Amino acid sequence: MLDISKDSKLSWKAKGLYAAIAAKKGNFSQRELRLESTDGETSVSRGIKELVEKGYLVQERIRKNGKFEGSNWTLPKEKKR
């Protein structure tokens, strides 16, 4: 797990989501994260988007027969960007 606590370009929301994701064993869903907090869909989505844009979270979209089926999420050992 990366130490993101001192990254001043990252919001507290994103830092909290990162900690919650890192504590999970295996994959997770955005819905699961929403149910574990008072944040709504938009808030969680924006926090995840921020983590992806800053290189702290990698999303692999899963397609089956050309249709979106879900995502695999990875916390890289090194910042991607």
Image (tube, rainbow, N blue to C red):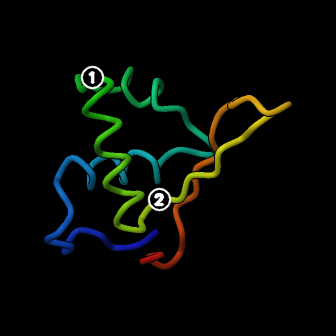
Q: Quadrant of the C terminus?
A: bottom left
Residue at the spot of label 2: 57
Q: Is residue 38 left or right of residue 62?
A: left
- Determine which of the numbered discs, if any, sits on residue 40 in the image: 1
Image location (x, y in percent) of residue 4: 29, 69
| Distance of label 1 from label 2 (alpha carbons) | 20 Å
Residue 32: x %, y % from top left: 47, 26
Instruction: Assign a secondary structure to mark 2.
Output: loop
Name the amino acid type tagged 2: Leu
**Amino acid type for the residue under numbered disc 1:** Gly
Instruction: Indicate the position of residue 33 as horizontal and vertical percent values.
Output: 41, 31
Find residue 67 and report its image quarter. Answer: top right
The residue most toward the front is 66
Vertical placement of residue 34 versus 75, above or below: above
Residue at horizontal 27 percent and vertical 23 percent from the top: 40
Is residue 67 toward the left or the right of residue 16 in the image? right
Estimate how packed mark 2 is, as few (under 14), some (14 to 19) or many (20 or more) residues with alpha carbons within 10 Å.
Answer: many
Query: Mark 1: which secondary structure?
Result: loop
Answer few, some or many: residues within 10 Å of disc 1's Cα (few below 14, many 20 plus, some between 14 and 19).
Answer: few
